[in-house]
Image (cartoon, rainbow, N blue to C red):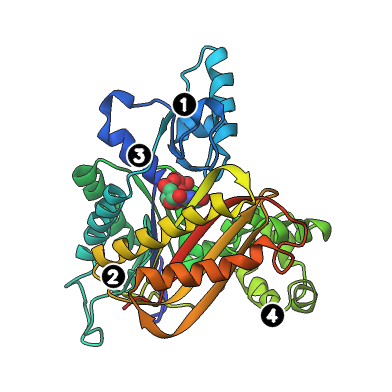
Amino acid sequence: MERRYTVDMRIIGHLDMDAFFASVEERERPYLKGQPIAVGSDPQGGKGRGVVSTANYPARVYGVRSATPISKAWELSEKARKEGKPPVVFISPHFRIYEKVSMAVMAIVARHLKGTQTTLFTADPPALEQVSVDECYFDLSFTGSFKKAEAIAVQIKKEITEAERLSCSIGIGPNKLIAKIASDFQKPDGLTVIYPDLVEGFLSPLAVRKIPGIGPKAEEKLFRVRARTVADGRKLSQEKLQGMFGKWGTELYRKFRGENDSVVISEAPPAKSIGEQETLPEDSLNMKILFPYLERQAKNLVSYMVRDGFKEFRTIVLTVRFSDFETVSRSRTLEAPTGSAEKLRQHVTQMFFPFLDKRENPGKKKIRLLGVRVEKLS
Ligand code: TTP
Ligand code: MG
């Protein structure tokens, strides 16, 4: 039976590609079909540094996933191999291809939104908001019914499978929060539709961690007051949550109830930035070793910027990760934009000096990773 809802009801979709980088690599190499794959830095026979960007589902069974240190991933792969299971195939990322696939996927979604307006009041095409390389929200309110919205999602999934030979998961709900949680609910290749009157029941048994924004720290705090599921979380008063989390507590109070009124924004200007970071072959505090990395990154960034059609930047961000994984970023916004690689090099060097002495590095910790990013591109 088709349920009826009010005219101002919203229907929001959220799409997220499954094991994105790894699925693309698998597609490009049909002989790897079904094999465990990890995309990330070079494991160098277990001595490699850096992390896994993503792993496909067979590799996740071994415990290999996004952000797993590559050396750990290698260990898990070796363990599997000794047990007679297929070892993980490690592949370096190919960002250009992911970017191209991403654009093709977004175009498929957009096609289902364009020209489908049913009333005089919606002059613009319904909104599509890309939030990361493999993820977007889209507004399906124009369909007027969850049934019709679901049919569109089925069609989008079918077209992505046919055109790109990749699978995705889609969630549909009365707002962005529910759509996002729903798309994750039956991954991979899932389609989950949460009608407004099912929101409460859908959320109740979920672990609090399933609420976007709740990370390991917030989860830990909630565990301490015995809130493991969303239903538990709902028992906490707004005052209590504010006491625990400050202003964000109010938002959390609403999230536990499935409430969220943020809108889907088309062409949200992506925070345009270009960056590069490298894990060093060995931790170091020797400026003779460290400076060449920064200089090379500065030079690379300016050439990437030009390649992407930008002339100038105004903000520089330097990221330093110490051997104990403490990570610090410092940024500097220039009086006027510049496109000079030499200026970038000078600023980065100046910004880096404090990390060599007690200003930013009182413990004289060695450095593990260096990264430079330029922002405010024009
Ligand atoms: P996700 O959508 O978070 O992950 P995924 O698509 O690989 O897997 P899932 O099926 O669970 O959605 O991220 C999209 C891509 O972004 C992912 O394929 C690789 C990249 N990525 C990183 O490089 N580092 C990270 O820590 C994460 C989480 C993602
Ligand atoms: Mg994904």
Q: Which mark is residue 236?
A: none
Q: Which residue is mark 4?
A: 247
Q: CA distance from mark 2 to mark 4?
A: 36 Å
Is residue 258 shown to the viewer in this render? Answer: no
Judge: label 3 CB < 8 Å from ligand 1. yes
Q: Which residue is mark 3?
A: 23
Q: Is residue 100 above or below residue 314?
A: above
Task: Say what secondary structure mark 1 lies in.
Answer: loop
First in sequence: mark 2 or mark 3?
3
Q: CA distance from mark 1 to mark 4?
A: 44 Å
**Residue at point 76% right, 62% down?**
362
Q: Which residue is mark 2?
A: 143
Q: CA distance from mark 4 to mark 3?
A: 39 Å
Label 1 or label 4, whichever lies nearer to me, is: 1
First in sequence: mark 3 or mark 1?
3
Q: Which residue is mark 1?
A: 88
Question: Can you say which quadrant of the picture contains the N terminus?
Answer: bottom left
Task: Say what secondary structure mark 3 lies in.
Answer: helix
Counting from the top left corner in percent of width and height, residue 65 is at 53, 40
Counting from the top left corner in percent of width and height, residue 81 is at 52, 16
Task: Report the amino acid beneath label 1.
Answer: Val
First in sequence: mark 4 or mark 3?
3
